[in-house]
Amino acid sequence: MYLFQISTTLTIICLVTCVAFGWLKFTSKNEKFLHYLSFLLLFEIITNFLKLNNIDNIALYPVYVIGDFILIMLFLTKTYTIENRFLIKNKYWIFLLSIIFTIEPLFLIFTKQNPILSYSKLISNTLILIYIASILLQFLTKINLKFIDFVLPITLFIYYSISTILFLSLNFLVQSNNIGLFYKIWTINNFLSTSLYISSIIYFYYSKKEELKKSLVE
């Protein structure tokens, strides 16, 4: 439990630093990703505020699922061009799917069940992973790739892959009521989130550096 509290505090500090640094090093290239991180920060602030005031925050879970999917997919589809007609690229499809993803967790909430038991997050994560995997596969055909091009897709792929596995574990633990192991897995998830935020800071730094180089050339 002690390690869980440390990891949670570290994650929030890294997220706040990451968002602040991102807006400080703002570029049009990282705008959508900043929206995604800002959403995560706002969600953390609201859920922790409710927790501190002993208010149940489980009803916010569908908001997290829909916000996470929409904002990360908008970033990926805008930043990386994929030559595959079977992949989701249209923002209207993204919004439609995100609404569908909220149906099951909302149903579980209304029927007094735990929305974490829904499969909506698993499905949305899988779609995100397919898109990121397509980006990485397309990178294999390119030459002279810059560090800035692949640092975020690789980090996001690792983040969503492990996060999906952890989600499946959490789903099982919620049903078995194993609280101790639940906190251990959530601690791993916190450290995973921290690594994503640190990689994001690196991404923002190199994005700004690249933009400044272009402006000097012009």
Image: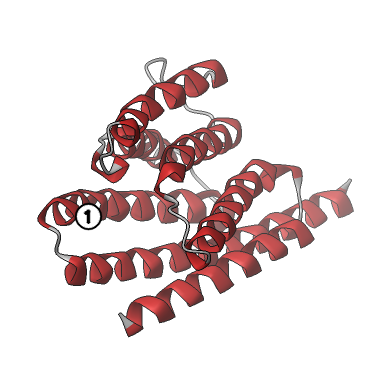
Which quadrant would the C terminus be assigned to in this image? top right
Number of marks in the image?
Answer: 1
Give how far across and how far down residue 41 sits, in percent.
59, 57
Nearer-the-camera pick, 124 or 204: 124
Furthest-left residue in this view: 176
Nearer-the-camera pick, 152 or 50: 50
Q: Is residue 37 visible?
A: yes
Disc 1, SS: helix
Furthest-bottom residue in this view: 2
Q: Residue at x 57, y 55 (%)?
A: 46
Q: Residue at x 27, y 48 (%)?
A: 164
Q: Which residue is mark 1?
A: 170
Which quadrant would the N terminus be assigned to in this image? bottom left
Amino acid at the residue labelled 1: Leu
Q: In the picture provided, is 86 more to the left or to the right than 11?
A: left
Q: Residues within 10 Å of mark 1 (few under 14, many from 20)?
A: many
Q: Residue at x 19, y 54 (%)?
A: 174
Give how far across and how far down residue 54 sits, in percent.
46, 63
Give how far across and how far down residue 151 sits, in percent.
50, 56
Q: Residue at x 18, y 69 (%)?
A: 181
Find residue 85 and report its image quarter.
top left
Q: Is residue 83 visible?
A: no
Nearer-the-camera pick, 149 or 92: 92
Give how far across and how far down residue 14 sits, in percent.
56, 71
Above/below status of 47 relative to 104: below
Above/below status of 130 relative to 83: below
Specify how the rendered protein is coloured.
secondary structure
Find residue 205 and report its image quarter.
bottom right
Q: In the picture provided, is 36 more to the left or to the right than 124?
A: right
